[in-house]
Image: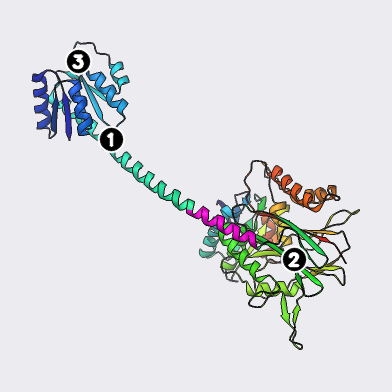
Amino acid sequence: MKVLLVDDDPVARAIHAMMLHAQGHEVVEAADGELAWQLVQETKITFVVSDWMMPNLAGVELCRKIRAANFEDYVYVILCTSKGAKSDLIEGMDAGADDFLVKPIGPEELRVKVRAGERVLTLQQGLADKNRELARINGQLQSAHKLVEEDLKAAAWMQQSLLPQPTQQAHGIECLWRLEPSGYIAGDIFNCFSMGEHETGFYLLDVCGHGVPAAMLSVTLSMVLTPEATYGSPLMALHPLTGKSEVLSPDDAVRELNRRFQSIDDRYFTIIYGLFDIRTSTVRFAQAGHPGPILIRKGAKPKTYGEGGMPVGLWPKIMFDCFDIPVQVGDRLLLYSDGVTECIDGTNMAFGEERLLSYLEERADVPLEDLLEDLILKLKNWRGKGECTDDISLLVLEVTAT
Amino acid sequence: MKFLESSSGSALTVKVLESRITADVAASFKAGLVEYVKKGNRIIILDLGEVTFIDSSGLGALIGSLKAMGGNGELLLCSAHEAVINMFKLTRMDKVFRMFKSPEEAVSAIS
């Protein structure tokens, strides 16, 4: 190791230099603190054995300068005091000295103290190397994270573009919605569209889990779940005799979806799919593991319909039920994902279906737009500072004509 | 994910020591259950007494574990809380998993 030996007494310096040489060190000598300070700055030497009392710059001052400079590599400093001269060890430690030697210094004492310092420097170096490596990795992570975030933002934009127009109208139905993804992108998706001349289809689905894998499936599903899907819509079928495309009953449509989307990794989705027929003023629903629709009718208590059903994608060949809700002009149907009812407050209490129903009852006369906005706000307040762990989606359909 | 195991006859009872089985623990929940299946346990009674909530990912993990048994065994549930029971009813999973009020009831149902 290279050691800077600082002493204004040439005899003492020569003796100590000899000892250090004999112990295998390379010795650089300086006759006072000022010269030593120059050398420390120029040669990046990291081990200093310095006398305390010296002209120009005392050992303790040299020590202070070294600490103040805050070199990239730690400089280990041993201060030497003379026996009898009452040097203030506290002052020395305050100045940043690592260790002390009392003159006259024996070779063995010098050897163990320098070796102890060398160990400290080795550890220090190891830590510094690790820190540099961590900083490098951290930089890489940050840029990777930025890239992922940009990708997610782009994906979120694409997903948003698949959602219905802010106020979409179909045969006798006006629809409004809100989507609050738990991250950039959601596993929830929904839509509302005209089917044929008399019917309006609408659905809300929730792919289990969140994030990219859930969103990829939800986007795929939204491409498929339209009456004009490129490779044969699961919502339509060709009539065996006439060969004309016909709207499938919701239960058959969901069964077809289940046939096509069998999961390979426990990933499934829940869906509520409704079909409004303006001729019969009836909405026929198929419900697959999804919370049932809520009918909001003026002058009546909001009511949840449906008795559940298995989710889609778990087992092939399962049957799905359907049920009808007769509707009249002014009726509203709320479809929502479980992120609404399972939204928890600070004490892990879920918002729950009952609270949702009574909220809807209180707001029976509020315009649709405000109803949704207020509900989202209410859920956010309910959650408080808690984490948003699931996507929240709301789709309301108002019957405008029958 | 922590489990507390006890065996009674041919069945292994596994108590889930977690209050919420959600997306962040679903993978380790399933890994734990699949490990029991791999060890040759054919009848597993899952005690959900400590579980107040299971989300869709948790349910997926449970079904994945059942599928891992390959139809050669049974996964029974017991002591489920009301919120969990409601979720199972909504998704008709109460038709897929036999559910009991207590581990004792589950044990006597299989013996």
| Residue A288 in view, yes or no | no
Q: Do circles 1 and 2 both sit on a common chain?
A: yes
Chain letter for the residue marked with disc 3 in the picture: A
* Tag 1 near tag 2, CB within 8 Å: no
Residue A40 in the image: above or below residue B58:
above
Identity of the amino acid at label 1? Asp
User: Could you say where residue A175 lies in the image, as x and y percent from the top left?
Assistant: 77, 60
Q: Which mark is residue A53?
A: 3
In the picture, which quadrant includes the C terminus of chain A?
bottom right
Of A268 and A281, the residue lying toward us = A281
Q: Nearer the viewer, mark 2 or mark 3?
A: 2
Q: Amino acid at mark 3?
A: Met
Seen in the image, is A261 located left or right of residue A108?
A: right
User: Which callout, 1 or 2, points at the residue further toward the start of the chain?
Assistant: 1
Q: Is residue A68 left or right of residue A211?
A: left
Question: What residue is pinned by disc 2?
Answer: A202
The magenta stretch spans which residues? A147-161
Do marks 3 and 1 share a chain? yes
- Above or below, A135 against A337 in this view is above
Instruction: Name the amino acid type tagged 2.
Output: Phe
